[in-house]
Image (cartoon, rainbow, N blue to C red):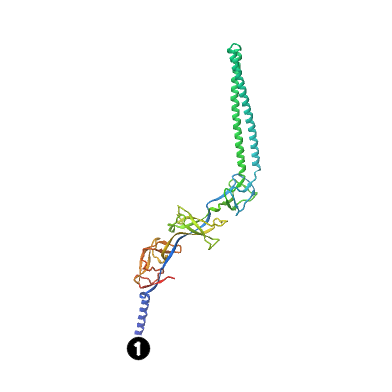
Amino acid sequence: MRRRLLTLSLLMAVALAAAGGFAYLRFWRPLDVQVAEVSRDVRVTVFGLGAIEARVLSRVGFEVAGRLVEVSADHGDQVPAGAVLARLDSASQEARVARAEAAVLSAEAAAARAEAQRDRAEALLAQRQSTARRRRELASQGVGSREAAELAETEAAAAQADVALNRADAAVARAAQAEARANLQAERVALGKHTLAAPFDAVVIARSREPGTALNPGEVVFTLVAPGSLWALAYVDEGRAGDLALGQPATVTLRSRPGLPIPAEVVRIGLEADRVTEERRVHVKCTACPTVPVIGEQAEVVIETGRLPAARLVPEAAVHGFDGAFGTVWTIEQGRLAQRRIRFAARLIDARLAITDGLPAEIPVVVQPGTGFAPGRAARAVAAP
């Protein structure tokens, strides 16, 4: 009986010792806690996913209908402004131009004839006015007949009416001549529309039609972009877009060139956010764009919004109740764990939050909270790896 009691007592003592050891290890032993160290020259960046676009992009075609007979450019070609890209069959339009030119010659001849008739009528008017003046003088002196004088004056009046009529005919002929010239100009312009020229220095990124195709007015034949107008359109989360500004440096990484970021600069920030995705549109212009762009290619954009001379960086997962500016962190104060609500200076692209002020430098900040954390628990600070 005594042996059984002794054994039971020993077992209880061992259990109590184990429980005490476990409680010490679990609740009273100082924890080794990783804390944030000070980082220097911290880049504050935001990330946006988007695509390569062109500010100057034109889908060009003919303004008139016709059959495509010549195509002088293909995708990937660089063409200067004014270079001929394609032509339509212009035989019928050339015939219209020839007919308009003949009409101009006819109108010019009619105008010349009307001018000559006007000059003749004016000369005849001058002669009859002179005759009427002499016969009136003779009649007043009693030498000539009054009837002859009156007849001469009537002929002079008729000649005056003929002059007015011929002047009107000359004006009509000049108007017809101007109309013929305008019609000729219109036909020549229409003939010019049978030739498609590059509107600016461009790169051909698509050719949509081939020779022999019957085209309707406005049908796209080429898609052109201006090489110097390439930029990347990135969609940035509203929650990270507050510090964006024009001129900020950025990098663009194309999906076809992973690991090769291209330097760029912010050139436009959209003034309207997407109400569904809650993102803002940001355009960045690359300073060393590809020679032959691929419009629509996916691009990752990283924009530097600022730099912090020094900061302590805490993973966002280690912050409780973060609302975009404030959050609660674990600290070590007088050798024991505590909690503080602080304001963060910036939110980094790698899901870390920067602390620059609001927390004394001698108070360590925990970067990896554990399950045994409780306010007042003893803790020792160790550097985070």
- Percent from the top left, x then y, of residue 102? 65, 36
Residue 144 horizontal/vertical position (percent): 61, 12
Label 1 crowd bin: few (<14), some (14–19), many (20+), radius 10 Å: few
Q: At label 1, which amino acid type do we have? A: Arg
Residue 13 in view of the camera? yes
Which residue of the protein is positioned furthest toward the bottom in this rendering?
Answer: 2
State whether residue 126 is above or below residue 110: above
Left or right: 41 with respect to 66? left
Instruction: Residue at 58% x, 15% y: name it.
Output: 137
Q: Nearer the viewer, residue 11 or 276?
A: 276
Residue 67 percent across, percent down from the top left: 64, 46
For disc 1, the marked residue is 3
Residue 25 figure quarter: bottom left
182 vs 238: above or below? above
Quadrant in which the C terminus is drawn: bottom left
The secondary element bearing badge 1 is classed as helix
The correct choice, above or below, for 270 with respect to 120 in the image is: below
Find the residue positioned furthest to the top. Answer: 142
**Position above or below: 270 against 259:** above
Residue at 63% over, 35% down: 104
Quadrant of the image occupied by residue 149: top right
Residue 371: x percent and y percent? Answer: 39, 71
Quadrant location, the N terminus:
bottom left
Residue in front for this viewpoint, 260 or 343: 260
Residue at coordinates 35% horizontally, 88% vertically from top-left?
Answer: 3
